[in-house]
Amino acid sequence: MEIVKYRFQQHGDERGQLVALEENKDIPFQVKRVYYMYDTVKGVRRGYHAHKCLKQILIAIHGNCKIHLDNGKETAEILLDKPYEGLYISNDMWREMYDFSEDAVLMVLASEYYDESDYIRNYDEYIQYIKNEVKE
């Protein structure tokens, strides 16, 4: 499994740091939706789904968390702990977010508008979907 992290350019001086992101330049797709998670209860795992079409960049803009990725053949655990680094998650990838620090803010940049029909929320259905994709 290839893990793709983007390291975003930081601009800073004695006043602090700034990261600017531009779609199709710093982000490899047009951004159609932005959302973020915070105040996540200790011990809670989030996600538990894959997407048929949507691609994402996850950025821990404050604090840290871990991401579990599963492509149906391999799994990986990734720590997100830098506000200038983004994890690319392609479509067809199962994801779970967990082990959030108390101060964690996880921002997600998405390639598509919200569409419930794009979600695969059952892991067994996800595995079947991946097997069918390989056959086609």
Image (cartoon, helix red, strand yellow):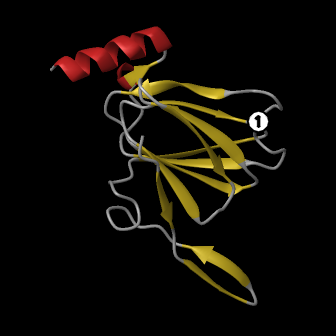
Looking at the picture, tell me which residue is in the foreground, 50 or 124. Answer: 124
Q: Is residue 60 above or below residue 70?
A: below
Q: Is residue 109 above or below residue 115?
A: below
Query: What is the total number of numbered labels drawn onto the structure image?
Result: 1
Q: Find residue 132 and report its horizontal and vertical position in percent.
A: 25, 15
Q: Is residue 82 left or right of residue 30?
A: right
Q: Hey, what amino acid is under mark 1?
A: Thr
Looking at the picture, tell me which residue is in the foreground, 55 or 20. Answer: 55
- In the rendered image, the quadrant that contains the C terminus is top left
- In the rendered image, the quadrant that contains the N terminus is top left
**Residue drawn at (41%, 16%), measured in percent from left and top?**
126
Q: Find residue 9 and report its horizontal and vertical position in percent.
A: 52, 76
- Residue 55, image quadrant: top left
Q: Is residue 68 above or below residue 20?
A: above
- The answer to whether one can see residue 93 in this image is yes
Q: Is residue 118 left or right of residue 100?
A: left
- The answer to whether one can see residue 122 in this image is no
Q: What residue occupies the far bottom of the structure in this picture?
A: 14
Could you classify mark 1 by the number of other residues whose Cα lies within 10 Å: few (under 14), some (14-19), or many (20 or more)?
some
Q: Find residue 90 and report its horizontal and vertical position in percent.
A: 38, 41
**Residue drawn at (75%, 37%), measured in percent from left and top?**
99
**Residue drawn at (39%, 15%), measured in percent from left and top?**
127
Looking at the picture, tell me which residue is in the foreground, 89 or 103. Answer: 89
Q: Say what secondary structure mark 1 lies in.
A: loop
Looking at the picture, tell me which residue is in the foreground, 16 or 42. Answer: 42
Q: Is residue 124 above or below residue 65?
A: above
Q: Which residue is mark 1?
A: 40
**Residue drawn at (76%, 40%), measured in percent from left and top?**
100
